[in-house]
Structure formats: C-alpha cells, structure tokens
Image (cartoon, helix red, strand yellow):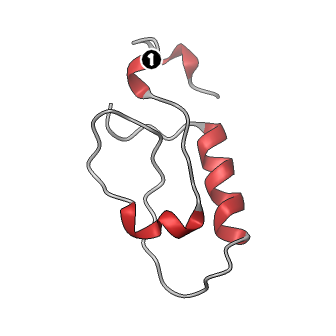
Amino acid sequence: MAILLSFDDFTNLAKRVIAADRVGFAVVYGISNNKKTWWNNSLTSYLGDNPKAVSSNLPTTRRWLRT
C-alpha cells in the first residue's frame, strides 16, 4: 500500500510543520515509511519528519484502521 499514513505519523508530521523554523510554501505529502510510494518528500527534509509505520508490516484486513 503506497498511500498509508498512520495516525502516529500524521500527528508527528503536524507537530513538525507547526514547529518549523522555515516559513514559506512547501508541498508535503503525508505518507508513512512505505516500501513503495508515489511521492517524494526529499525537498521537505528540513522538517525532520521521520515516519515509522510501514504498510507491508500491517495485516491485510482493515481491522487495524482506527474508526
């Protein structure tokens, strides 16, 4: 799954964006640390975001989703 964004990774990204020293325009893709992904966040490395969740480690059912 290339588009997974776990709740923990989302909250960490939100905190990093709010606390960023550099202000301006940036396109930041909210994605976890998936093996396959459609996007590249290398230009936003100054945020220090380090996603932890990996989609290939999750069960194949949707039971892991928070509702």
Q: In the rendered image of this protein, does residue 28 appear above or below residue 1?
A: below
Q: Quadrant of residue 22?
A: bottom right
Query: Which residue is at the far bottom?
Result: 24
Relative image position of residue 67 (x, y in whole percent)? 64, 28
Q: In the rendered image of this protein, does residue 48 appear above or below residue 63?
A: below
Label 1: element kind: helix
Question: Looking at the image, which residue is at 38% across and 62% down?
Answer: 42
Q: In the rendered image of this protein, does residue 24 appear above or below residue 43?
A: below
Relative image position of residue 9 (x, y in whole percent)? 60, 43
Label 1 crowd (10 A; few <14 / some 14-19 / many >=20): few
Q: Quadrant of residue 61?
A: top left
Image check: 67 left or right of 27?
A: right
Quadrant occupied by the N terminus: top left
Question: Looking at the image, which residue is at 54% across and 69% down?
Answer: 46
Q: The residue under label 1 is which amino acid type?
A: Asn
Image check: 27 left or right of 64?
A: left
Relative image position of residue 28 (x, y in whole percent)? 46, 65
Q: In the rendered image of this protein, does residue 16 appear above or below residue 56?
A: below
Task: Report the number of discs.
Answer: 1
Question: Looking at the image, which residue is at 26% across and 49% down?
Answer: 38
The answer to which of 54 and 67 lies nearer the viewer is: 54
Relative image position of residue 51 (x, y in whole percent)? 54, 43
Image check: 62 left or right of 3?
A: right
Q: Which residue does the numbered mark 1 point to in the structure image?
A: 57
